[in-house]
Image: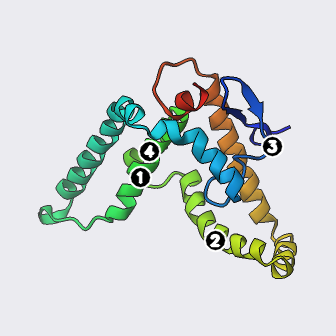
Amino acid sequence: MALEMVLPILSVREPVKVVRLFAEGVVVSNNADHSRMRRLLSHAFSETALRKQEQIITHYLNLLVEKLHQQIQESEKGEAKVNLVQWYNFTTFDILGDLCFDESFGALNQGQYHSWVANIFKSLKIARMFRVFRAYPIVGSVIFGLLKLFPQVTKAGEEHRAFTAKKTERRLNKQTDREDFIRFAIT
């Protein structure tokens, strides 16, 4: 069975295999699963946890400032048009990648979205529609049926889940004392 199907949810210091809890994600999950995921991750956002993560976050904020300065220096006349939303997204996902998986996505260093992150932005648009389709099963069942005509959609979802499972498994197998999201979730 794929890792995302039995992702360990460590709520009582012992792995409990919960089917597909994180497969859909916090954004599009039903209320019960969303509450469980929030409860599991809440410790990672406590004041104590944030203080322990401060050094990691500060590293990426300093890298953002460095990259923005670099953009200005490399431009003509020292004036640069910079898409700050994009750079803030790079920073956010590099921080989250580091705090979730002990690996940055490298967006700040590369100056572009990692393919996994780009797919998240694409899927968020689709996820909103899916939520509506689920609320209206008569229409939704027809739409979901039509999706079978587009195997690339299914393939993209499978690749996303496989990449997530691989990164999660790699992080769970690391022996580290880092104060990241996984550590707070399992203690």
First along the sequence among labels 3 and 1 = 3
The quadrant of the rendering that contains the C terminus is top right
Q: Position of residue 131 (x, y in %)?
A: 70, 70
Q: Are there few (<14), some (14-19), or many (20+) residues within 10 Å of tag 3?
A: some
Distance between mark 2 and mark 4 Cα atoms: 24 Å
Location of mark 4 (residue)? 94
First along the sequence among labels 2 and 4 = 4
Q: Where is residue 175 in the image (x, y as percent from the top left)?
A: 57, 17
First along the sequence among labels 2 and 1 = 1
Say the numbered circle drawn on residue 90.
Answer: 1
Q: Evaluate if marks 3 and 2 touch, with contact meaning CB atoms under 8 Å apart.
A: no
Amino acid at circle 2: Arg
Name the residue at 72% across, 33% down: 8
Q: Please state which of the two labelled residues, at mark 3 or mark 1, is closer to the viewer.
A: 3
Amino acid at circle 4: Asp
Distance between mark 3 and mark 2 Cα atoms: 23 Å
Name the residue at 73% across, 37% down: 7
Q: Are there few (<14), some (14-19), or many (20+) residues within 10 Å of tag 1?
A: many
Amino acid at circle 1: Phe
Location of mark 2 (residue)? 128
Location of mark 3 (residue)? 19
Could you say which quadrant of the image residue 48 lies in? top left
Q: Are there few (<14), some (14-19), or many (20+) residues within 10 Å of tag 2?
A: few
